[in-house]
Amino acid sequence: MNEPKIVVPEISFDSEVFDETRSLIDIALANLLAKVYKGEFESGDLNIKISLSILDDYTKLPGEDPLTGDTIETMYEYRRPCIDSAISTTLKKVAKLKASYAPELEIKEHDGAFVIQELPKTQISIDDFEF
């Protein structure tokens, strides 16, 4: 029996196992940057979730019957990696409701509190006019 060929020498984030994940991260990051840069959103988060499990599986492999030499199928049990990744972005938009209160009134301190009062009313006297 030939030795199985090693397909991925080392499982790491830089290995081909995560090629698609890295591509999706690049796409999500570019979209996030564009939206924040254009001012559509105040800021954003990029979240990466990687889930790993090992599944017990089996497959049929061709083999040889040791007694007859006939070709037969044998069951081969193995453990298979299952790596799922999910990339999500959260964009933060600040919703602002504005109100303005700027009447033609005067703010004054009165007995330790601030109050808003009308402007002084002046009475015009005949003496205010120059003849």
Image: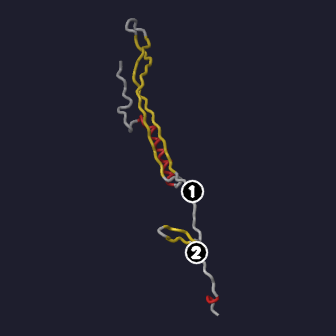
Q: As displayed, is residue 86 above or below residue 5? A: below
Which residue of the protein is positioned furthest toward the bottom in this rendering?
131
The front one of 120 and 100 is 120
* Mark linked to residue 119: 2
Spatial CA span between label 1 and label 2: 30 Å
What is the tally of numbered marks visible in this picture? 2
Within-10-Å neighbours for mark 2: few <14, some 14–19, many 20+? few
Q: As displayed, is residue 33 above or below residue 12? A: below
Q: Quadrant of the C terminus?
A: bottom right
Q: Earlier in the sequence, mark 1 or mark 2?
A: 1
Q: Quadrant of the N terminus?
A: top left
Q: Residue at x 42, y 25 (%)?
A: 55
- What amino acid type is highlighted by mark number 2? Leu
Task: Give the image location of residue 79, x and y in percent.
Answer: 39, 24
Task: Give the image location of residue 128, x and y in percent.
Answer: 61, 88
The front one of 114 and 58 is 114
Q: As displayed, is residue 53 above or below residue 60? A: below
- What amino acid type is highlighted by mark number 1? Leu
Quadrant location of residue 77?
top left
Q: Residue at x 50, y 68 (%)?
A: 114
Single out the mark in the foreground, 1 or 2: 2
Q: Which residue is mark 1?
A: 97
- Could you tell me which secondary element the residue under label 2 belongs to? loop
Quadrant location of residue 103?
bottom right
